[in-house]
Amino acid sequence: MKTQPVTVDGSVTHALHEAHQRFANNHHGKNASYIPYLASVPANLFGISIMFCDGTHAEVGDTDYAFAIESISKVFTLAHVLDDIGPQSLRSKIGCDPTGEPFNSVVALELHKGRPLNPFVNAGAMATVSLLKAENATRRWALIESTYQAFAGRDLTVNEEVYASEASTNQHNRGIAWLLQSYGYLYADPMEVCDVYTRQCSVAITCHDLVTMGATLANGGVNPVTNTRVVTAKTIAPILAEMTLNGLYDTTGDWYYKVGLPGKSGVGGGILAVVPGVCAIAAFAPPLDVAGNSVRGQLAAEHLSRTLNLSLLH
């Protein structure tokens, strides 16, 4: 049986470069087009990063290109809320089950009397934002911003062009927010929550930022670069459970068969995989499959999981 690396060594760097070389010319998928800005991002961009719990890391490709975090942001807002109110309180308000519907489905809400089935669909993500203990939008945003920056180990900013593009096309999410309120599953002003949610999805990160955020989860809530505790250790298991069950929208099961790791994707082209106690893998490539997941990102994660014996199923 192949051994599992616990730090960057020759096998890790070789596997990383092999993945990039093997999949860089894969042209399947298309950029997200329903958000105008995302459609304009160069489709050939491709970066892969890996970081271990000892802080060692290796990268290849376009790992310093800043892209929109999009739905991967849901993981880190969830981390703050879980740390604040605990998993039992959260689960009384938001479920942890797959919806069987698209991530922006209204049907899933109606079928379950307005209760979001998990925090990674848009309804559940907005409900999560509404659970932040904040008296107004400014304070709500400050909590999100400080959490993301602690995970990344550096200051992060909103891409205002992405935010403007999303804010002008988020009518569907506004409708979901009002529907949540009508059923009693939103805990702050609907338009405030929708706007803060839109802003969190517009945070600009690099592949290096993302892998650092993921490695903080892998390291039990302690950022391996800054050595700062970001969330309590008991918060990690519920987050990874959600990533395992719901991280890649309608194709989460297929991802878990192939990669065998908790994961999360975003329509900005980012993808994250976490190996608890070992490392995190992050990839960025804008073209998406029909479910909204980076095509090359999934291939890279699968290659690294298999080659480095990282799958939790092995």
Image (cartoon, rainbow, N blue to C red):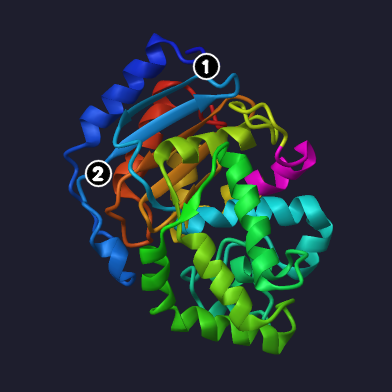
Q: Quadrant of residue 293?
A: bottom left
**Which of these two is toward me, 178 or 151?**
151
Q: Left or right: where does residue 100 sit relative to residue 58? A: right
Q: Which mark is residue 4?
A: 1
Quick check: 30 above or below 261?
Answer: below
Inspect the image, locate mark 2, and give the three-letter code of the amino acid beneath it: Leu
Residue at 33%, 39% in the rendered image: 299
Query: Bounds of the magenta span?
Result: 230-240
Q: Which SS type dominates the magenta stretch?
A: helix
Residue at 49%, 35% in the rendered image: 211
Q: CA distance from mark 2 to mark 1?
A: 29 Å
Does the stretch in magenta take in 234?
Answer: yes
For the residue carrying disc 1, how many other residues have a C-alpha within 10 Å: few (<14), some (14-19), or many (20+)? some
Q: Position of residue 152 (x, y in %)?
A: 55, 40
Q: Position of residue 275 (x, y in %)?
A: 57, 31
For the residue carrying disc 2, how many other residues have a C-alpha within 10 Å: few (<14), some (14-19), or many (20+)? some
Q: Of the residues tagged 2 and 1, which is closer to the observer?
A: 2
Q: Left or right: where does residue 285 sit relative to residue 173? A: left
Label 2 vs 1, first from the N-terminus: 1
Q: Is residue 32 visible?
A: no
In the rendered image, the residue lying farthest to the bottom is 182
Task: Give the residue pinned by disc 2.
Answer: 45
Q: At numbered mark 1, what does the secondary structure look like: helix, strand or loop?
A: loop
Inspect the image, locate mark 1, and give the three-letter code of the amino acid beneath it: Gln
The total of numbered circles placed on residues is 2
Q: Which mark is residue 301?
A: none
In the rendered image, the residue lying farthest to the top is 10
Does the stretch in magenta take in 163?
Answer: no
Quick check: 288 above or below 48?
Answer: below
Q: Position of residue 174 (x, y in %)?
A: 53, 83
Q: At numbered mark 2, what does the secondary structure look like: helix, strand or loop?
A: loop
